[in-house]
Amino acid sequence: MLLKAVRLAFVILAGVAAWYVTSRLTSPPATSRESLLYALAAAAAAAALVGVDIAFRQQFLRSFVSVAFGVTLGILVAAILLALLAALLWPTIDIGEGPGLGKEIKELIKLLQPVIPIVTLTSCYLAVSVVLRTKDEFRFIVPYVDFAEQSSTGGGIILDSSVLIDGRIVQIAEKLMLTDPLIIPRAVVAEMQRLADSPERLLRERGRRGLDEVARLQAMPRLRVRLFEGDIPGAAAVDAKLVRLAQILKARLATNDFNLAKVARIEKVDVISINELAVGLRVTYLPGEQLTLRIVRAGEQRGQGLGYLDDGTMVVVEEARESVGQDVRVVITNSLQTAAGRMIFARKAGEEPPAKGKG
């Protein structure tokens, strides 16, 4: 509410200031009608600036730099065009005999005066439009300036909806103390919002969890989280937008979507898979190591008992069917990596392994 009052006061004061300057401080002072027009124009300009501030929200600083760059470029182009136009009109100026270089210049300016504002405004508009539409692709401005140390990768990490819905990215970012900017495209947020509004309970819960994870990431002061508001050229689907954005920003893509990861790698984009990372962080047990394990249920084979490590890895313990519900000391005998994950085989500590038969 206070911010709205500040914006309204800014618009009103801009108009009052313009009226005061034109009616009291100029020489000769403007008429009442002219002062009113100047005041309305200043108030309209202030309102437009407030509208830009609201439209761009968090990207206001970067967008302001883009607009300033575009205006500067437009003025430069306009100056070149006007200079060329002046060169074309110079031979047509004839003020009679006698020295009159100054008069010729004044006459030339008089001829150009009607087109100067048109050429300047047109050039500025086109330049600003081009810069705003291509600033990410051509890198006219640095997309994520934090006035702080830059990460080693520079582009940051783009998060897709599967990673946010998964829920482990918050712990990973916190425990691994990530310094790379975490980039969440607006298209991803919109996708999770559609899920949150779904009539199906499971989809609705997934979407809400993803939105909650975004809020948790933003609430962590040590992380640099950015919502990418800009349009992504050359892509329509969300997955294509993510891959294209990663190429433009030279960023890495974090996803649990197997197909998206394959497409991204084909497009030469570095991919971070939370599932692969979780597998890589699992504790490795070598044959002969011992650990205490709770047997939770019987196995498929005769005499087997099953337990699970803290990371979810299944442990098959020989001759432990009668120990279901108990904590037993086991010795690792072997491990097997399957498509479904890793499986560890063990036997009870203190029991000798069965003797191999002779062939």
Image (cartoon, grey):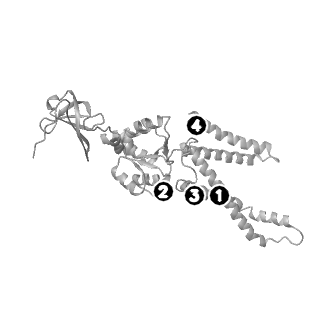
Q: Earlier in the sequence, mark 4 or mark 1?
A: 4
Q: Earlier in the sequence, mark 1 or mark 3?
A: 1
Pick the front one: 42 or 85: 85
Q: Which residue is mark 3?
A: 130
CA distance for labels 2 and 1:
23 Å
CA distance for labels 3 and 4:
31 Å
Which structural element holds mark 3? helix
Which structural element holds mark 4? helix
Label 3: few (<14), some (14–19) or many (≥20) C-alpha neighbours in 10 Å: few
Label 2: few (<14), some (14–19) or many (≥20) C-alpha neighbours in 10 Å: some
Query: Residue 41 in the image: x percent, y percent?
Result: 68, 48
Q: How many marks?
A: 4
Q: Is residue 9 visible?
A: yes
Q: Earlier in the sequence, mark 2 or mark 3?
A: 3
Query: Residue 98 in the image: x percent, y percent?
Result: 90, 70
Q: Which mark is residue 74?
A: 1
Q: Which residue is mark 4?
A: 4
Q: Amino acid at mark 1?
A: Gly
Q: Earlier in the sequence, mark 3 or mark 4?
A: 4
Q: Which residue is mark 2?
A: 233
Which structural element holds mark 2? loop
Q: Earlier in the sequence, mark 2 or mark 4?
A: 4
Which structural element holds mark 1? helix
**Of the two numbered discs 3 and 4 in the rendering, the one whose residue sits closer to the viewer:** 3
In the picture, the quarter occupied by the N terminus is top right
From the viewer's perspective, tell me whether residue 246 is left or right of residue 145: left
Pick the front one: 133 or 296: 296
Q: Amino acid at mark 3?
A: Val
Name the residue: 33% across, 50% down: 258
Task: Give residue 321's quadrant in the image.
Answer: top left
Task: Give residue 124's quadrant in the image.
Answer: bottom right
